[in-house]
Image: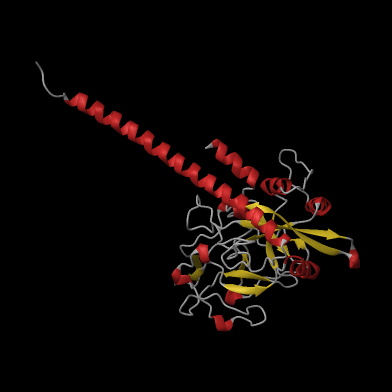
Amino acid sequence: MKKGFTLIELLMVIALIAIVSTLAVNKLGGVRESSARKVSFASQKSVGRAVEAFLAAGGRLNRLDSLVYAQSGGAPIFNSHAGDFDFSGGYASSTVPEGLGTDWLYSGPKEDDPDGAYRDTRNAGLTPDLRRVLCPYSLSEAEVRALDTTMGLRYVMAHTAYADAAASSYPAAHYPKARTYGDGTVPNASDGLDPNDSACVATILTNSMVVAAVNPMTDLGRTIYQACGQELMNTLNWGQSYDETKVRAEVAAAGGPLVAFGLGESASIVGKSDAGLENAPRATFANKKFYSRYILLLRLKKVGSGSVSKAIPEFAGVLDCEGNTLRAAEHIIKRL
């Protein structure tokens, strides 16, 4: 009677074990992602409810994270398109298709190379999907005033591409308080500037200051407007592009632009257990090198025209760190 296994039989058993192990690992990975997405979806809904309750109770939604780079030395970016999108400004189609160029959107601190150029450090900033759906928007004086009086949003936490700039060099008018470590030092490029704690400096919102907005010139951007209750009907045929003049008029008629700010730990809504959030949650499925906080959308509704026009800001919704609305996030979970 033959005892033991032949070499072929052993190889077959090993191959079967390898196949079963691969299937189990893949299944486990899918379960983990699905679980993380579900937690993120629940957090996203909780953030939305908390913001609505906070504002209804008279809370001031101050010190949100800016998603736009500050300039060298920490100064905010301004342009001449007050109260309007800048669809061409900072656009870099070769690197960020249908989105905000690297000259504008926060993508992590930079440091000097020996050849004088600048390079990104380990912090990759915002996720690629979110970068593709945002564009520059220059606040008007009326919008700045309305954000302050209606929602209490006076300061935003500014990211700087050159994060090792000394706090003492920041203009006092824009930077009343620098974000520092416990020992009083300023986060710098050599530290990597963790994107979960990447808002460096409090800067006051000012006329013509550039903030991030949902780009209605992109298909994903228009989907976000629709999810926030603003139907944009201008459809395209194959090979066509949206007309900027028509898009501006369409957005204004549908309720106004959606500007985007991150909900970081510095926000005034954070740390309140009664009406607010005890902490600023993160999207747990995101790679830690990306900014993984939730994004608050504020609609800048305009009433009237000309010299009698005024802005009426209102809370419009919450995006996750990939630019998904609640509807889109729920659909992703169902497919997992």
Residue 106 percent location from the top left of the image: 58, 63
Residue 176 percent location from the top left of the image: 63, 80
Residue 178's place in the image compared with 63, above or below, is below
Colour pattern of the rendering: secondary structure
Residue lying farthest front?
A: 274
**Residue at 54% of width from left, 72% of height from top?**
162
Q: Quadrant of the N terminus?
A: top left
Residue 142: quadrant of the picture: bottom right
Relative side of 270 to 6, left or right: right
**Residue at 67% of width from left, 46% of height from top?**
220
Residue 40 percent location from the top left of the image: 55, 49
**Residue at 54% of width from left, 59% of height from top?**
291
Question: How many numbered badges does the structure rendering display?
Answer: 0
Q: Nearer the viewer, residue 261 or 51?
A: 51
**Residue at 62% of width from left, 59% of height from top?**
101
Residue 169 percent location from the top left of the image: 58, 83
Relative side of 329 to 83, left or right: left
Relative side of 189 to 299, left or right: left
Residue 200: quadrant of the picture: bottom right
Residue 91: quadrant of the picture: bottom right
